[in-house]
Image: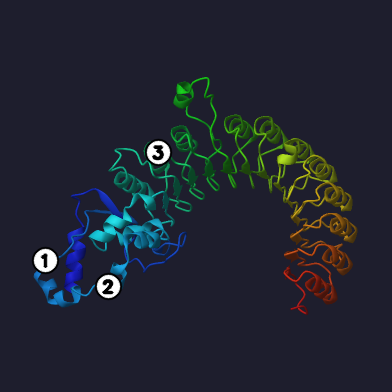
Amino acid sequence: MHCSLRYSDLSMRTLSTPSPALIFPPNTQGFQNGRGSSTSSSSVTGETVAMVHSPPPTRLTHPLIRLASKHQKEQANVDRLPDHSMIQIFSFLPTNQLCRCARVCRRWYNLAWDPRLWRTIRLTGETINVDRALKVLTRRLCQDTPNVCLMLETVIVSGCRRLTDRGLYTIAQCCPELRRLEVSGCYNISNEAVFDVVSLCPNLEHLDVSGCSKVTCISLTREASIKLSPLHGKQISIRYLDMTDCFVLEDEGLHTIAAHCTQLTHLYLRRCVRITDEGLRYLMIYCTSIKELSVSDCRFVSDFGMREIAKLESRLRYLSIAHCGRITDVGIRYIAKYCSKLRYLNARGCEGITDHGVEYLAKNCTKLKSLDIGKCPLVSDTGLEFLALNCFNLKRLSLKSCESITGQGLQIVAANCFDLQMLNVQDCDVSVDALRFVKRHCKRCIIEHTNPAFF
């Protein structure tokens, strides 16, 4: 039987039909079910290759296999499942596991390449030759519609460090219906490759280039700009853009992004350390529909930047300004005055915020559900009292390392915010009795603390 398996494997390794069935390194491990599960390629060494083969034969005729003919007549339980059930099961598999299934038998081959299963390509792992993998997969998916993958809408290749501009160019050329692209951590891609994608994929709405340190801008290629009619303008349809850890992004690049991506609703600029208040001014001129914005760890953003962000008014629901040390109560007052529908605020490490800023925030943003003012040493029980008496819908509150907070302030919060679900008081000087009081009044609350006497 061992020989038969070897013969089966060899019979399928042919270049007669250019249909990719497997993207994996040698010595792969077993199945890992579930969409988004880690693949075996990330846990081994060696180069990952893309296998190209024809559909497996329905029945093998090698003499050695006839010895097992009696066992072959017994149908496996999984083969009794109807096609629609098998497709449903396959839909939970990541791309590389789905390719493995295509190698089992002819029926599985046909089911594994059902177009409904190929709206998404998801590849992970540092060893994957992802450029080649994308080329082989798109070639197979283009069989019914030459040179175009009309069904493919999502490509996720996060953490594939071997991805280069060549792989992105393959996506841009073959996937005109692409709506979502995630290439976080792929630090070998450049501006030109990203420009190709946004120019040739007009329906792209979600773009994640976090950790791509060479990306400094999002724009159309010059050729695409020339071809567009005045009626269309030079706009990009991206609504969600994550440029976290794009360290070389500057105000000029943010200006270009804002001018081309006017439909942005979600923008994340965490640790884009060269961004200043001037970049935010450009952003607010063009992108007036932003709902979620993060400028965490952008150390040059100050209260003047908060004045610009406040122009979003009631449209702003999520704001992260963590560790922006130049922001004080003045900036918080701008946000509180104009962004009354704010639901989430992360101001951890903004040491210039005091009880006065918290008071103004609590009285104007009464629908606040999540607040992080950890490592704000000037916030005390007085600020917590204003929160408790105005923000009754508060569900998450982080006070980590707030030196001026005591158990009295926590009790006031617990007595008024019954829906509290998470409270972080790590490194705060609060008593066990205060923590127990919180637990009694907020029964669903998970308390993160550093008091060994409370459990």
Give the mark nearer the N terminus: 1 vs 3. Answer: 1
Q: Secondary structure at mark 3?
A: helix
Q: Which residue is mark 3?
A: 169
* In the image, residue 2 above or below residue 390: below
C-alpha distance separating marks 1 and 3: 43 Å
In percent of the image, x 11 and y 73: which residue is there? 66
Residue 246 is drawn in which quadrant?
A: top right
Image location of residue 64, percent across then percent down: 11, 73
Q: Which residue is mark 1?
A: 61
Residue contact between numbered discs 2 and 1, judged by CB atoms under 8 Å: no
Image location of residue 254, percent across then percent down: 62, 35
In percent of the image, x 55 and y 29: which residue is there? 235
Q: What kind of residue is marked 2?
A: Ala
* In the image, residue 174 above or below residue 80: above
Left or right: 264 in relation to 84 = right
Residue 373 vs residue 94, the one in the foreground: 94
Q: Which residue is mark 2?
A: 76
